[in-house]
Image (spheres, rainbow, N blue to C red):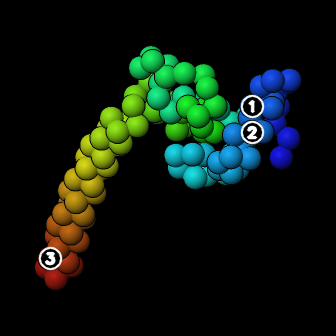
Amino acid sequence: MKYSSTGKNRLLRQALVDTHGNVCFYCEEELQPNFTVDHFIPKALIGSDEMFNLRPSCLRCNTEKNSYECGEWAKRIDAKLADVEEKIKRHKRISKRIKKLQKLHEEAK
């Protein structure tokens, strides 16, 4: 795959793909030609621009990770997941209740 960059940036991107594969380092989705380069240790937390600190990343993961350290980002994802799981349980209870009411209504006819 050819990457849409010039010069040094193109070489960096190709080196990241050669090292980590043609997938997002975080979600493992196939990279698009305009993939982003993430700082594993965010620059805001004194991360460097050295190759060992750079990872190929899809735009969605890089945007969500933002300047969080990976462990903190994982905690945030887990919290969102727990919230979604609770909503699913609630909706299943509601659906079960509606089906029960529909059955009672049908029986009453």
| In the foreground, 99 or 14 | 14
Q: Where is residue 72 in the image (x, y as percent from the top left)?
A: 33, 35
Q: Residues within 10 Å of mark 1 (few under 14, many from 20)?
A: some
Q: Which of marks 3 and 2 is nearer the N terminus?
A: 2
x, y (%) of residue 74?
Answer: 36, 42
Q: Mark 3 points at which residue?
A: 104
Q: Closest to the observer: 52 or 107?
A: 52
- Residue at 27% across, 55% down: 85
Which residue occupies 63% across, 39% down?
Answer: 56
Residue to which mark 1 is pinned = 12
Q: Do the residues labelled 1 and 2 touch (CB within 8 Å)?
A: yes
Residue 90 vs 15, above or below: the answer is: below
- Which image quadrant for residue 3? top right
Q: What residue type is labelled 2?
A: Ala
Q: Name the residue under label 2.
A: 15
Local crowd size for mark 2, using a 10 Å CA cut-off: few (<14), some (14–19), many (≥20): some
Picture residue at 64% right of the left edge, 31% below the top: 51
Are discs 3 and 2 less than 8 Å apart at CB? no
Q: Which of marks 3 and 1 is in front?
A: 1
Q: In this view, does 45 lie above or below 103?
A: above
Disc 3 versus disc 2: distance between alpha carbons? Answer: 65 Å
Q: Can residue 98 be seen in this view?
A: no
107 sits left or right of 37 in the view: left
User: Helix, strand or loop at disc 3?
Assistant: helix
